[in-house]
Image (cartoon, helix red, strand yellow):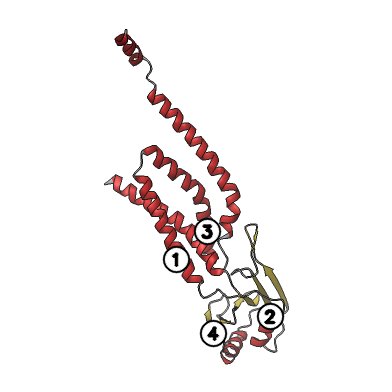
Amino acid sequence: MRHRLWQVAMLLLGAMLLGTVGLSAGSWYGGRGAVPLSADRPQEVAAELLPGTEPNGGVSVRGYRYGIFLAADDFGSAYTEFHYGYRPDCTLSEQLRRNAVARGWQDVHRVSGEACDGWRAEADGLLVTLTHRATGSTLRVAPAAPDRFLTATLAGALLGAAAGAALFWLVARRRPPVRRLVRTLVVVALLPGAVLTWSDLLTDGFAEPVWPIWRSSAGLLLPLSLVLLLVLLLVAWIVLTRTQKPTGPATEAAAAVRG
């Protein structure tokens, strides 16, 4: 029973590790083709949805995560924020909702905030989100996720999980040294990236891209895995050599028999 539970745990571990890699790869593939954010389009959107209001500040952010610059058409590559006042102005929510509906924006729905609820809307490949905090109201304009984003992300996660479970199932049918070697290499190579990925997902969801984690960590994890592989092979060779070479009384008895 304990052996069966251990096998199930290993299958789940392989599915989780490879599934996380597949999820990241799927989110990258599905996020390709997002509408690039031009320099003047966010200002036009702000004037369209909140006419007659002037922001007291703003910032444009280019996509840069874990040392990786995102392409202009990557989902999550850039966004522009406009700040209104130094206190939350909840009247802006109704103004944005009314203008978004009147101008044919889609997926208009409420967004919870600290001071009061805001709204979000999507049109022409752009996603607009109005939120209210104690420090003021903020309008964010960012590229919306392509239509295939969620499908590609789920497909990548499922394919990766299936590949991970199959890999660990095949490894479980091998001899103990091979099983331990492969499992150790996979865990060492993938566990740090998986932990960072799920930490990001629990914090920001898919608002921030997670695939740069794997690209930036590959330069460190690949050499580390190769070094670990060499060390494990050396240890396995030493163990096999000692088990195949009899010593002590057994050697003397064998020599006496031959004499």
Amino acid type at circle 2 is Arg
Few, some or many C-alpha atoms within 10 Å of disc 4 (few <14, some 14-19, many ≥20)? some
For residue 128, above or below residue 155: below
Question: The C terminus is located in which quarter?
Answer: top left
Picture quarter containing residue 80?
Answer: bottom right
What kind of element bears circle 1?
A: helix
- Measuring from the top left, give residue 92's x and y in whole percent: 62, 85
What kind of element bears circle 2?
A: helix
Tell whether 107 sits left or right of 161: right
Residue most extreme to the top: 259
Amino acid type at circle 4 is Gln
Say whether disc 3 or disc 4 marks the residue closer to the N-terminus. 4
Picture quarter containing residue 72?
Answer: bottom right
For residue 170, above or below residue 148: above
Contact between marks 2 and 1 (CB within 8 A): the answer is no
In space, the residues marked 2 and 1 are separated at their CA atoms by: 33 Å
Contact between marks 1 and 3 (CB within 8 A): the answer is no
Amino acid type at circle 1 is Ala
For residue 65, above or below residue 222: below
Say which of 33 and 112 sits in front. 33
For residue 112, above or below residue 179: below
What kind of element bears circle 4?
A: strand
What kind of element bears circle 3?
A: helix
In space, the residues marked 4 and 2 are separated at their CA atoms by: 18 Å
Contact between marks 4 and 2 (CB within 8 A): the answer is no
Label placed on residue 106: 4
Say whether disc 1 or disc 4 marks the residue closer to the N-terminus. 4
Q: Which residue is mark 2?
A: 41
Few, some or many C-alpha atoms within 10 Å of disc 3 (few <14, some 14-19, many ≥20)? many
Q: Which residue is mark 1?
A: 155
Label placed on residue 197: 3
Say whether disc 4 or disc 2 marks the residue closer to the N-terminus. 2
